[in-house]
Amino acid sequence: MSDYETFTHDVLVIGAGGAGLRAAIEASAAGVKVGMVCKSLLGKAHTVMAEGGIAAALANVDDRDNWQVHFADTMRGGQYVNNWRMAELHAREAPARVRELESWGAVFDRTKDGRILQRNFGGHKYPRLAHVGDRTGLEMIRTLQDHGIHEGIDVHMEHTILSLLKQGDRVVGAFGYDRERGRFKIFRAKAIVLATGGIGRAFKITSNSWEYTGDGHSLGYHAGAELIDMEFIQFHPTGMVWPPSVRGILVTEGVRGEGGILTNKEGSRFMFDDIPDNYRAQTAADPEEGWRYCQGDKNARRPPELLTRDHVARCIVREIKAGRGSPHGGVFLDIAWIKSKLSNGEEYIKRKLPSMYHQFKQLADIDITEEPMEVGPTTHYVMGGIRVDADTQMSRVPGLFAAGECAAGINGANRLGGNSLSDLLVFGKRAGEFAAKFSLQNSLGEVHPDRLDESARQALEPFARDTRAGEGPYQVQKDLQEMMQDKVGIVRREDEMRAAIEGLSELARRAGRVGLEGNREFNPGWHTALDLPNLLTVSEAVTRAALERQESRGAQFREDYPEKSAEFAKVNTVIWQGEDGRMQIRRDAIPEMRNDLKQVIEEMG
């Protein structure tokens, strides 16, 4: 241990996005010593890419909104396999977290009378997303960082955690390395909060940045935590499809929330061809009426483009497969049509969607005020993750907490747009609060040198292998991403997923033969090699969970089981590591919902 630099904290937060920053701020406010480890630079968290807004029932645009409606919308969007207690806490506490962010300096778009403006989004009954143009995530991170720097948080940038350290059942620290020099570090802590984000880099086409390799999911799993709902991968309907270098980059749902329409190459608004019966009477056939709805007209009906993300994504895939797609394999998303309705249409679009305007102008040489965008589904978000207690966010491993995308429960089978940012705030705060309480009630645990030496040895193995006998890490990663995209993507079948299980075994063997040249300093190949075990772990979890759930629900669509099944209507899939080191899976019944919450859902129809 004397060879490794050691840092000691009461609470260690792994991840510096919205959930991690909010957890660190809350823990520090409790008077404990807080450390934060982030894989990239502070301010580079993937949260900055969240564009649409923060879902919270402020009722600033439509006074009919309240936490009960938000709760019912979240449960319906999640197909009722959500953790209902988390959905309740989220809906109740989100408004306070948004107002708190405002008090810390967040600059939101405003209504005419000066209140926080809210926009429509898919699956939300009323305008609910507090936003800053289409740069809401960036404003959230800026605000949290500006507030957090006064809290005395120790920040370790460009560090990657390789393993969690335990004493008996309890977590007592983490072992990692700095990405610049490759030097190993020990982080001792009484409590740890995982806030590492998602797993999008397990797929070929994704809106996620390079950091999203399932680190928190894998760290928690190998430490003894359970993963739930890993089959539910959200494929956002609209990512860029052209040019190839930017394929998958997110096109915010805010475009549709401001009145954007989806058409195929024939100019048809294909979303009208597949509207669920319970939405048909509420849907506007006239795009102008849909646009008025987006502007807050209470008498207008909603456009079909604002159905839930899983539904819109499948409709787009249908058009592409039927040969009605755009020239580069997507469909068209048109916001430029609004110019014909407004004298200042060009300025309106640029003001409402500044990031989208610059993104398409700079990356694809397309002016979205003049012509439609080409878009298609992109791997965006994982509803599944570490199973946590709804109130405290602690996993079944004492002292190990999780929040944000690497935790699971609130979203069920499908997340509503905007719920992710309020999830980060609500449960980031709770994770930090209860991690601090845990740390005050416990002492530092012991760290065993043998465990550290074994982790270090495994991390350095690629340098000891003959590069002529193996292959580079990038090819293994590329083949993994292509296989997951093809066999465990938007539309799934048992035969393809069983082939994926076999493929993952072979990829694990190949990853074990990866050889590297050079040394530990400034070596991106080494970083990629160390990401592979995490990617393989989460890929296997997704595939096994998707095989286990023999139905189509929310973000999981099984071509061989295209309908919902009563057998799976009230169960979560649970994954954990068995004593033999192999991945285990079971189904757990969802606890009965409280009667008052059942009544809320019934009243909301």
Image (cartoon, rainbow, N blue to C red):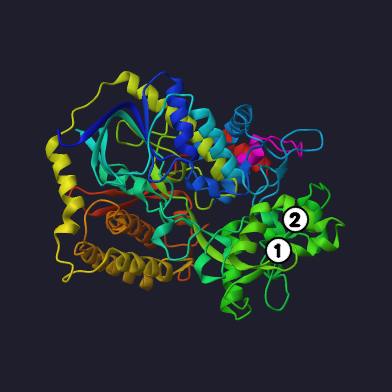
Can residue 70 be found in the magenta stretch? yes
Could one spot residue 122 in this view of the protein?
Answer: no
Pick whichever, 25 or 550, lies toward us.
25
Residue type marked 1: Ile
List the single residue furthest toward the left.
450
Any mark on residue 99, and which? none
Could one spot residue 283 in this view of the protein?
Answer: yes
List the single residue furthest toward the bottom.
323
> Could you tell me which residue is drawn at 24 percent across and 43 percent down?
183
Q: In the image, is residue 205 above or below residue 107?
A: below
Q: Mark 1 points at which residue?
A: 368
> Could you tell me which residue is drawn at 69 percent across and 57 percent down?
256
Q: Where is residue 210 in the image (x, y as percent from the top left)?
A: 42, 55
Any mark on residue 349, and which? 2
Residue type marked 2: Ile
The residues colored magenta run 58-71
Can residue 104 be found in the magenta stretch? no
